[in-house]
Amino acid sequence: MNILANPTKLLAVKVENVSRRSVLKGLGIAGGLVLAAPVMSRQAFAAYTTGASAMPHGTVVDPRVFVAVAADGVVTIVAHRSEMGTGSRTSLPMVVADEMEADWSRVQVRQAQGDEVKYGNQDTDGSRSTRHYLIPMRQIGASARTMLEAAAAKRWGVPVAEVKAANHEVVHAASGRRLGFGELAAEAAAQPVPAIADLRLKDPKDFRYIGKGKVSIVDLRGITTGTAQYGQDIRLPGMKYAVIARPPVVGGKLVSFDAKDALQVSGVEKVMEVQGWPWPSKFQPLGGVAVIARNTGAAIKGRDALKIVWDDGPNATHDSANYRSQLEEAARKPGKVVRDDGDIEAALKSADKVLVGEYYLPHLAHASMETPVATANVVGGKAEIWAPVQSPGGTREDVAKTLGLTPEDVTVNVTLLGGGFGRKSKCDYALEAALLSRAVGAPVKLTWTREDDIRHDFLHTVSAERIEAGLDKNGKVIAWRHRSAAPTILSTFVAGAANEAPFELGMGLVDLPLQIANIRCENPEVPAHSRIGWFRSVSNIPHGFAVQSMIAEIAHATGRDQKDMLLELIGEPRVVTLNASVKDFWNYGEPLDSYPIDAGRLRGVVELVADKGGWGRTVPKGHGLGIAAHRSFVSYVATIVEVSVGAKGELTVERVDTAIDCGTFVNPERIQSQIEGAAVMGLSLAKYGEVTFKNGRVQQGNFDDFPLVRIDEAPLITNVHIMPAEADKPPSGVGEPGLPPFAPALINAIFAATGKRIRALPIGKQLA
């Protein structure tokens, strides 16, 4: 447990990554002896299991991999997940520090390189960093603490039971002796790593940092002062700069290009074809023409001067207006039955009234503030990448496969991400940079412009949702049929995929937690004509929007209060059990015994937000309240939105209250920031978000035609209410669950204020 070396010392590069060799040196284990880190398939000391062991490379629990103590007492903790605002680069090391009794002011965090054999799964997506790594990080911290205590006991010649780590020291209470962590570093490193079963975890009442909300993110100062290192900040000696002209239609390909004018642009050095892969091809590059220059500005000017002939391929006539009609028509016809409770046909036939709601949500672009960017240096049969990636381990594997190298010959350095939202889990931009570097024999930074980002994105799916609700003569809902028609993410991987995958169906469709006797969910086939990818909250957005909008419509039709109708349909507190009609149910990768579909917890957040948000309060004329609730990423969220709508349709979000039940939580400050961010993002998407196609081409390209809300449009007040949890309650997701209930709560509030029901997003000019 000695000093962790910093192997990255390049010109103006401050991205500090940990190499395997430097860790072994720091622990005094240099040479041929390498001790394997255990991979945990079950989590000892927890009353629950998670899906962590089913992820690629599982979890690794070994203090020698994640912790180093220097002679001066500085503790270095490795962050193996990417940082894009969720706080995982702070929260997970903070768990280690708390459990090992380290003083946070004497802790530094180093970012891991992409290496899943060493660190375990590194995918920063699915809102699972804390839920998969809370217990392993505690075990790592407890192991380090145990080794420090054993070293002190050995030096003093006393039983280890008589010593205790406390605030960066080990203390022998009987004699009053104490030793700092730095003084024990070398001796602790020589101690054997304790068996997981022998560890003693802290009593939660003794936590110093976990759950307290008093620790700022480690990068706060760097972000505030502009010194934090993002992908765009990387500079290497001799580096070239590149942009690529890609086929404007998915499935298209290059026919020919004329680079004469481009090569006349000052600073342009080379124009070359970039290899493309036939669609669908996972995350492989689209191909096209690259312009390589002495700076990015010159490269962009050179690209503008290119004369290119494209073959637009099979999607050349794709048109959003026609496609919307196709989706809506598909949703009006029977589709593949994916859940079937009771007898839906008989129930609808016997209903006193059948209400029908049809909802439409368009494609959305991720549009993170930092566009995709990557720097690559491929030389001598080895490749090194610097990039803001959500899946560094996956990037390493894909770069190796694309270049014909072994993963051991690829190094992936992870920078901070200027936003991700799922886009940066796809590493096509890193692959492009690697191909260009290999071709020119020099380091290359590849930048995507905003137009590249929006027009060649892995878009959030477009969706048509249709719900039929049958009511008896007393206004009770006795039948519910929900058809969801949307192109699937599977189409990015498999040609001809036309039905939503189980992981998409499990996001608010087949796991519907309403207490209705007759429920049928159907999924019509829909072909894809664009690249579809993960987006923050994924299919929970359209499914949740439709369900929560429909509940409010039922409330209005029956003269009921929105909140009362929502609670009535959720029903009594219970665990929802799905019958055999639901095939391959995907519970966010988690076991149902640890993470059941718990209607009681959904009721709980509705009741909490109704209380804290003042549901039912009198609001001024032109104002309205809306409410919605949703379970996603095994968390439960409910939101109340208050809006005012002016005489000319001016929309103001006066107040947002959101309650979240995410089980055991580590850093409430980050929960608050994520939920506040979800309100801003949810408003932006609902108000403006739309990507459309004509002649196969994306029609939007920048923030003039794909606008985001500005600061003067943001909610005036946002309150976050976190449901208290017992220490043994499994942690669940936070980064994504705040988004799905926002848009329906907003739309329900607009209806309450104006009497106008919006069923298709974006809101746009519908209020004018």
Image (tube, rainbow, N blue to C red):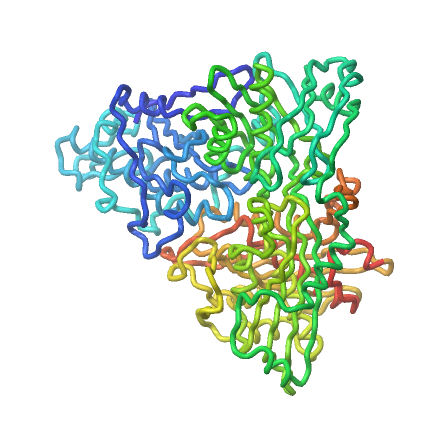
* The quadrant where residue 155 appears: top left
Residue at image position (70%, 19%) is: 271
Residue 76: image x %, image y %? 38, 29
- State whether residue 383 appears in this view: yes
Up/down of 212 relative to 401, above or below:
below
- State whether residue 706 appears in this view: no
Q: Nearer the viewer, residue 425 or 603?
A: 425
* The quadrant where residue 449 appears: top right
Residue 72: image x %, image y %? 34, 22
Q: Nearer the viewer, residue 130 or 360?
A: 360
Up/down of 758 relative to 494, above or below:
below
Up/down of 145 relative to 583, above or below:
above
Residue 149: image x %, image y %? 23, 35
Q: Residue furthest bottom?
A: 473
Number of marks drawn? 0
Residue at image position (64%, 39%) is: 368
Side (left or right) of 134 relative to 282: left
Q: Quadrant of the C terminus?
A: bottom right
Side (left or right) of 33 relative to 226: left
Q: Quadrant of the N terminus?
A: top left
